[in-house]
Image: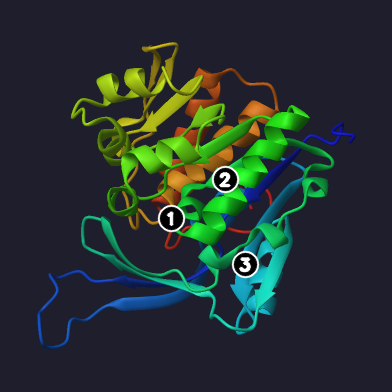
Amino acid sequence: MSRAAGALLVVGDVVTDVVARHRTPLAPATDTAAEIRTLPGGAGANAACWAARSGCPDVRVLGRVGTDAADWHERALRRAGVRPLLVPDAEAATASVIALVDSSAERTFLTDSGAALRLSPDDWSAGLLDGVARLHISGYMFFAAPSRETARLALRDAREAGVPVSVDPASAGFLAELGVDRFLAAAVGAEVLLPNADEARSLTGHDEPERAAAELSRRFPLVVVTLGAAGALVAEDGSVTARVTAPVVRPVDSTGAGDAFTGAFLAARLAGADPAKAAETGCRAGAEAVTMIGGRPPTGPPGA
């Protein structure tokens, strides 16, 4: 198969986000005033959109969506410069997330995985790797049996084809439910692991991000741990090799900041950047992401 095009293929979740920004603490059993918006989201789809935003000319996303919102999500992805490879599901609704965002821009998610985790091996084909230079798998795919098997199949086919694979663990809460050992076993063979600090802590038991990053890099050739406003750590061969700072911004909504980092990081790697430079690019995208509502970048080229 030819891979001269250098495409990025993302296998992941496509989600309808309901973002509720509340300036005061939630008031139990009564009303709390909030600004509420319904937006396209999903860790996998968001990362794909940020990769396109960051200059990757060919980005594709494979995901399963309910027929209720398939057309809406396809249009949104195309507007963002991403080629949608969406599998319609007539039996389950599109995944949805309620993101509760407080006055500090910190977010808490209520997640209904819907059709997203019903992505099955029948939805995958090794032919999807044609023209692909990198495969990225959203960690949400590992949290249900059908999508986990699909993720493992995609990872296996990519390795056999010589396509490097990255994985974003996606959720410390879901990691705890699945079990660390099961996640790590399913992700064997990935070249890059992209956890945030909480996920790195869950995967290793180490509170210090540096120790966690170093330990994970003994399992995966390249590990990049995101630290929010503190930037990111790059680790290889059992040690931290770079510390990258993030631009100082005034946050509005942290939803999707990690997805922005992932997409921009992968686009930079595809363009030839070394891990530290790619992490710098990721930090800039993450900083931009927290200044807007929702997990997607504005459509159009940077600066639009």
Residue 86 appears in which quarter of the rendering?
Answer: bottom right
Disc nearest the viewer among 2 and 1: 1
Report the Cα–Cα distance between label 2 and label 3.
Answer: 14 Å
Report the Cα–Cα distance between label 1 and label 3.
Answer: 15 Å
- The residue identified by callout 2 is 137
The residue sitting at 39% across, 51% down in the picture is 290
- The residue identified by callout 1 is 143
The residue sitting at 27% across, 49% down in the picture is 176
Q: How crowded is mark 1: few (under 14 residues within 10 Å), some or many (20 or more)?
A: many
Disc nearest the viewer among 1 and 3: 1
Kind of residue sitting beneath label 2: Ile
Q: SS of the residue at dot 1?
A: helix
Report the Cα–Cα distance between label 2 and label 1.
Answer: 12 Å
Q: SS of the residue at dot 3?
A: strand
Which residue is farthest bottom?
30
User: Is residue 99 toward the left or the right of residue 288 in the image?
Assistant: left
User: Is residue 180 toward the left or the right of residue 273 in the image?
Assistant: left
| Residue 208 percent across, percent down from the top left | 20, 25
| Residue 190 percent across, percent down from the top left | 56, 31
Q: Is 215 drawn above or below residue 167 in the view shown?
A: above
| Residue 155 percent across, percent down from the top left | 63, 39
Residue contact between numbered discs 2 and 1, judged by CB atoms under 8 Å:
no
User: How many tags in the picture?
Assistant: 3
| Residue 278 percent across, percent down from the top left | 55, 26
User: Is residue 100 toward the left or the right of residue 195 in the image?
Assistant: left
Label placed on residue 64: 3
